[in-house]
Image (cartoon, helix red, strand yellow):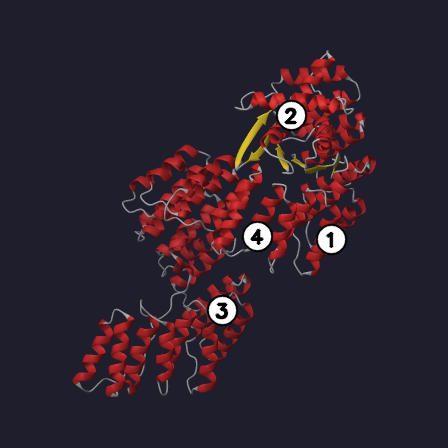
Amino acid sequence: MASFSTAQPLSLPRHPTLSNPNQPTANNERSRHTLSLIDKCSEIRILKQIHAQMIRTGLFNDPFSASKIFSIAALSPFASLDYARKVFDQIPQPNSFSWNTLIRAYASGPDPARSIRVFLDMLSESHCHPNKYTFPFLIKAAAEVSSLSLAQSLHAMAVKSAVGFDVFVANSLIHCYFSCGDLDSACKVFTTIQDKDVVSWNSMITGFVQRGSPDKALELFKKMETEDAVIKASHVTMVGVLSACAKLRNLEFGREVCAYIVEKRVNTNLTLANAMLDMYTKCGSIEEAKTLFDSMEVKDNVTWTTMLDGYAILEDYEAARDVLNAMPKKDIVAWNALISAYEQNGKPNEALSVFHELQLQKNIKLNQITLVSTLSACAQVGALELGRWIHSYIKKNGIRLNFYVTSALIHMYSKCGDLEKARDVFSSVEKRDVFVWSAMIGGLAMHGCGNEAVDMFFRMEEANVKPNGVTFTNVFCGCSHSGLVDEAESLFKEMESSYGIVPEEKHYACIVDVLGRSGYLEKAVKFIEAMPIPPSASVWGALLGACKIHANLSLAETACTRLLELEPRNDGAHVLLSNIYAKSGKWESVSELRKHMRVTGLKKEPGCSSIEIDGTIHEFLSGDNAHPMSERVYGKLHEVMERLKSNGYEPEMSQVLQIIEEEEMKEQSLKLHSEKLAICYGLISTEAPKTIRVIKNLRVCGDCHSVAKLISQIYDREIIVRDRYRFHHFRNGQCSCNDFW
């Protein structure tokens, strides 16, 4: 939830103020004056001067005075941990207050684990014992490093020290267990608290929300209202509850919560107002969100970005853009929100346009979220040059390759046709999670490297990384494009029994595709009949595609019928069946199918191919004349086709969907396919030996596949075509798919 980013303490339990039980008072006027200076100190330089004065006068030998200057050095807004540790080491016999202060400072610092080492020093080097002020900060450190074993050990020590049931210690444990993902232990601790305070309830509610159980958070809030009349909900409570409503898209209860806030006069600070706004936008009530937004006297960047997100969710990009333009101070979060909205909703070109605009902004630094979203957009449109620039930017600025950035780079290079670079990125990182492995397996699969994809799967297993559903989808695709039937069947059988992953629709569709592409059509049908779930459109689509490859007309008609029962407006199914009819010479059936499409208003998705030249994406539709260089493109196309004919090329007329009587017109229709235009533009825009990379939105047709093979041989150019399903690497008259696609 966006509003949580400005209110990190909301999820943390409240701690008591540290107290020093032994506070000797200074007896002379000079001591009182020095101590008053400590209270007024506002920078570390002055504190060091006071420290020096205390050493010269002997005041530092007073335990109370020493602990006072130490606590300022450790916990003040201008604190310095290194200096504080030096002050601590000068204290002859630090008391419990000083030890707890040092533990607290380290627990809140950049290296929380150091607080544990201080605690161990306290146990071994002093006569002080841990108390109820010690454990909350140690437990906080365990939460920061997400160490469940450490949390359990501290919990046991707290119980043995007779403070395990203290409300502050218990609240810390609840937060820690949630941070470590142990919800059961958090719930058990909650039930042991005799006198729960509002923080106890808040820690549970917020923990459930952050750990993906928003329904339990709402149940707990209702229980709090009915069972604990003494506890009054705070703005922290309401933020957690509203966040749960947002995650559940429960607008009705969200409205009740907003009314509750007014009725109970809950302090509505900016964080809570932003949470209300976020709930309205996530639940799709943009009008209520706009009303609240307009009424807010104080707004921060979270407010503006939440509103921008709300419009983006509803795909009202013009309104989202207006919000961005109206922002008093545009930060990277707002830019990321718009880029991500475009990218995730299938508008990669618009996402890249916003990114290019962002590049012109001064004093805004790109972050990992920016890069991941933009790399994903690059992958969608094949913008390899921009993807390479982003990779260089990452290296130049020393940006850490976390799992998300690494996966995005591998995905971008793979989908833009540079598999070797994807391999380089994968090899360059030492730590890899399931998403990094899956991205590499997917890249190998789409490029037809099925055996390598399977080997990578087992390497992943050896690395003790557990696969997920995406991993299996990717490796099955690799098997499909390489005819690895035995490997796919073996892995499918082990999915649930060995890996605990229940097969989903997409996995069944993959296996049907593996069997069908390899010619085992009867086996594929039996597999479908034995499925424990109803076959989806993708399952029947996989079978229909296999029927086209193997020219099985009767089974194709059955598969198409079943597919259209589920998706009557599926234009791809009509086109596939029409192509099968055409390949079989059944032009009357083609005519009837085309008539049906006209009557029902169903139109074939137009073929569109794109090619990137000098960082600019050029798009071509079939028969396109819109490109400024179309005259030269068609001139090159004519030259290419004549040269191919002299080398034995004959057009594949079965690829013509329309009923065209004249052979010359059929040939002309084939010539105008978008991938041919894009390849010709690549020939006139680049010099050999530069690779020509083309992205097509549909499956490449057989005729264009044959033409690309011949061009690669006659013009001595490597051509890489990415269609809807896979990559085709054309070299020396051959394709990497071995005509198996």
- For the residues labelled 1 and 4, say whether their Cβ atoms are less than 8 Å apart: no
Compute the Cα span from label 4 to label 2: 36 Å
| Label 3 element class | helix
Does residue 485 appear to the left or right of 396 in the view shown?
right
Q: Which mark is residue 571?
A: 2
Mark 1 crowd level (few <14, some 14–19, many ≥20, 10 Å Cα): few
Compute the Cα span from label 3 to label 4: 28 Å
- For the residues labelled 3 and 4, say whether their Cβ atoms are less than 8 Å apart: no
Return the residue at label 3: 142
**Looking at the picture, does residue 485 appear above or below residue 458?**
above
**Looking at the picture, does residue 196 appear above or below residue 247?**
below
Return the residue at label 4: 406
Q: How many marks?
A: 4
Does residue 612 appear to the left or right of 19 in the view shown?
right
**Looking at the picture, does residue 676 appear above or below residue 140?**
above
| Label 2 element class | helix
Q: Residue at x 63, y 52 (%)?
A: 424
